[in-house]
Image (cartoon, grey):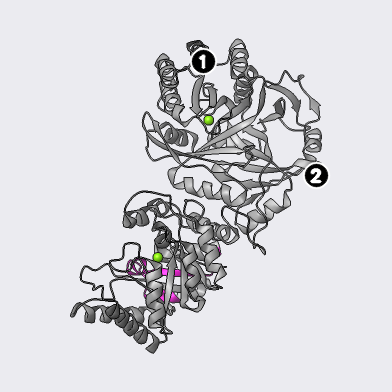
Amino acid sequence: MQTSIATVSISGMLDAKLTAIANAGYAGAEVFENDLLSSHLSAREVGALMADLGLACTMFQPFRDLEGLPEPQRARAFDRLERKFDVMGDLGTDLLLVCSSCSPLASDDRARMMADLHEAATRAAARGLRISYEALAWGRHVNDHREAWGLVRDIDHPALGLVLDSFHSLARRIPSSSIGDIRPDKLFIVQVADAPLMDMDHLGWSRHFRCMPGQGELPLDDWADAIRRIGYQGYWSLEIFNDRFRAGSASGVAVDGYRSLRLLESGITRPALPPSPLPPRIAPRGVEFIEFAANPDEAGQLGAMLRPLGFCPTARHRSKAVTRWTQGAISIIINGEDEGLAHSFDMVHGASVCAIGLTVDAVEPVLERADTLHVARYSQAVAPDEWPIPSLRGVGGSLIYLVDRTTSAAMWAHEFPLPGEPAGPARLTAIDHIAQTMQPEEFLSWLLFYIALFDVTKTAQVDIADPMGLVQSQAIETRDHAVRITLNGSLANQSLSSRFIQAYFGAGVHHVAFACDDVFTVADSAIAAGIERLEIPRNYYDDIEARWGLDPALVERMAARDILYDRDGDAEYFQFYTRAFARRVFFEVVERRGYQGYGAVNAPIRLAAQARHKPAPEHLL
Ligand code: MG
Ligand code: MG
């Protein structure tokens, strides 16, 4: 795949954008006219910079309102066109994007449109240039790529071709099978964007909500397949208008875009057709461990929260101040080392989750795929006798360790040979989900990270009402639900999610949920052992009893234990929360009776309860 991105997609000044684009590994970039107009560099200097950076200028864009105009507007449009041709010479591109007219003056007379586009192509050809014509979803008379293709085909001028833009076609639900009619030599460039499905006007939707392939919900796999099937060999160029990306870092967005094109190339939601340019996507088998960084004081507090939940410190590390707390198959590592990543993590964030270990069938393909996607590996000094566990940089600078399923038992035995206390009865069965909170501008980036790297699917996005604002939440899950991670971001400064990020100095894990088969038994033993749980108001129980027609005795049992409830058809969900550890991270216990969600309906209750417990403004949760 030949990769390209429109400069409008990322933030900053044009020279900085181009540098970020080149560094991220793209072959080319489309220069967006407004970026050029606001640059201190001349078109010739921009062209020279792109040549120095090894970036092809894949297109100059956009040229608006050309075809179908009456005089004198028509003559003026053609004068404008000639001036754009001059700029293109300086930029070093031969391709100009002309989008279908939105002018109220434009005629719907097809013969006139054809004559104008033919004239434009003839003028372009005289200067060794080409024009690619794009049907805007909101074009006045041409708003469907089938009509645009009809014009290009019938005009049949060598300097006139078509742009296919995924947003314009898929927002209007035009079947991708129609792409099969297009001649590949006439498809001059392909522009790519994803978007969430929304019921709004095409222009506003396009200007503010476009996102990278994989981050939205458009059926891009079928669309890209149809384009590949006709034998298209040209550039795949991202064209993303999104306010959040323009608020993010240029290099971060450029890398995300590159990653998203690689993902599109190998299939976003289904395995790639061979030969795939990417190593296959692997589904993690489960969460092997969660590692907390904590100084000795914090380690004591954390242990005091884990004990009532049934965890025991069953083993110690061979040489480091690191303890393994276990219960059945669940492992929690508490890292109290005074050097290394965990220590610096604790220094920056306070006690918190510094790493997640994921169990995989094979490590090497994940690392290869990560390299191709420009996901950073992390390496720290490993003592000669230490078990090396490869890791990648994840949310908030934390790590994702990749643990080989076939050698995990040997790894534990080697690294944690020193026995601790005997294990207690296992009432918790697994890590059900991990919740991460991040800045809103990072949200789509981390979503893309997970879906590009692993064989996981994303749930629909939900908005959760926080007492202080709205939090958006979306989960990524393996198909067997062995690994579930929820991502949460808030646009409101004062929401608990935002305050988490401020107090925590960055994104991170804000709760870990454990699965069990009997939430009442777990709650009873946790309460007997002195757990500090999140208290739920009585009103909540009156409401659910009425809403679901629940047995009053069951509701009383839940109320006595602060257990929350949700239902989806016949499927039921029971959950309770601990108070926050170090006012930062908390635990949840869930029992799923066929239920596959996360109790989003209860999140406002939980957030309000946590807001009530909030001890001081500088603290949270
Ligand atoms: Mg476009
Ligand atoms: Mg949860």
Residue 32 magenta:
yes
| Residue 296, image x, y percentages | 64, 25
| Residue 556, image x, y percentages | 49, 11
Q: Report helix, strand or loop for mark 1.
A: helix
Mark 1 Cα-neighbour bin, 10 Å: few <14, some 14–19, many ≥20: many
User: Identity of the amino acid at label 1?
Assistant: Met
Are the residues tagged 1 and 2 within 8 Å (C-beta)? no
Q: Which residues are magenta?
A: 25-47
Residue 367 visible? The answer is: yes
- The quarter of the rendered structure image containing the N terminus is bottom right
* Residue for point 27% across, 81% down: 78
* Residue for point 65% across, 18% down: 307
> Residue 558 got which mark?
1
With respect to residue 304, does 203 lie above or below? below
User: Identity of the amino acid at label 2?
Assistant: Pro
On screen, residue 539 versus residue 323, left or right, reads left
| Residue 446, image x, y percentages | 53, 47
With respect to residue 77, does 558 lie above or below? above
> Residue 384 got which mark?
2
Q: Nearer the viewer, residue 320 or 506?
A: 506
On screen, residue 70 versus residue 231, left or right, reads left
Q: Report helix, strand or loop for mark 2.
A: loop
Q: Earlier in the sequence, mark 1 or mark 2?
A: 2
Q: Nearer the viewer, residue 82 or 122?
A: 122
On screen, residue 598 versus residue 202, left or right, reads right
* Residue for point 37% across, 76% down: 151
Q: Nearer the viewer, residue 314 or 234?
A: 234
